[in-house]
Image (tube, grey):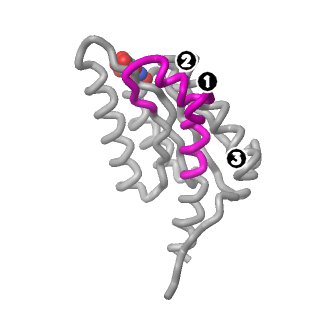
Amino acid sequence: MKVIKSMVAAPKARIAVVVARFNHFISNSLLEGAIDTLERVGQVAKENITVVWVPGAYELPLTIKTLVETQKYDAVIALASVIRGATPHFEYVAGECSAGLSNVAMTSNIPVAFGVLTTDDLEQAIERAGTKAGNKGADSTLAALEMVNVIQAIKG
Ligand code: INI
């Protein structure tokens, strides 16, 4: 039996973090969680981390597609919060963001971690951005780090 089970330390990994400016207060906390995890847990060197700000969650897929096409990154972390409002707008933004990110990962073979909160209200977003329900920026970063090692292990 061969089992592939990878660590989260990836000191040589080149990581891009793409973060939506919309709901900036939440995004900033997700970004803090991501950077802290990259440096302290992943042991990724500062010079190997690129942060890209974009207007909103809807812009994440195209930005990440452009980044992976440069072949300069081993994984990308997408960070945003989409908060439900009074209209169906939420469904379009969250749906297109999620489908687009999955599509980029599948067509590029580069892990794209989904650090996008989709919540009913601001309180739920705050809870998941560094308060009582953890930090989704940190959680998605752990997934990205592990996936860098998993993909490398599979490719041998
Ligand atoms: N973008 C978000 O990141 N979160 C949201 O909650 C949100 N809402 O609710 O509208 C949002 N909209 C902006 C969207 O992502 C685009 O930036 C905009 O439509 C321009 O293309």
Mark 3, residues whose alpha carbon is within 10 Å: few (<14), some, or many (≥20)? some
**Relative to residue 148, is residue 29 depicted above or below?**
above
Q: Report the amino acid beneath label 3.
A: Asn
Instruction: Please state the horizontal and vertical placement of residue 121, each as a whole percent of the image.
Output: 41, 18
Beta carbon of the mark 1 residue lies under 8 A of ligand 1: no
Image coordinates of residue 140 in percent, x first then y, are 54, 44
Distance of mark 1 from mark 3, alpha carbons? 20 Å
Which residue appears at 35% of the width and 39% of the height?
Answer: 98
Q: At x 53% / y 42%, what residue is drawn?
A: 77
Asked if disc 2 and disc 1 are in contact, CB closer than 8 Å, the reply is yes
Q: Quadrant of the C terminus?
A: bottom right
The residue where tag 1 is placed is 28
79 above or below 23?
below
Can you identify the residue that label 3 sits on? 48
Q: Indicate whether residue 65 is drawn in magenta.
A: no
Give 122 or 66, whichever is nearer the viewer: 122
Residue placed at 40% from the left, 26% from the top?
119
- Say which label, 1 or 3, has the lower sequence index: 1
What kind of residue is marked 1? Asn
Q: Tell me the quarter of the picture where residue 136 sits.
A: top right
> Is 113 placed above or below 107 here?
above
Viewer-nearest of labels 3 and 2?
Answer: 2
Residue 85: give x, y in percent of width and height. 32, 14
In percent of the image, x 38 and y 48: which residue is there? 104
Helix, strand or loop status at disc 1: helix
Q: Which residue is mark 2?
A: 24
- In-image side of 91 versus 31 (left or right): left
Which region of the structure is painted magenta? Answer: 117-143
Tell me: 131 left or right of 57. right
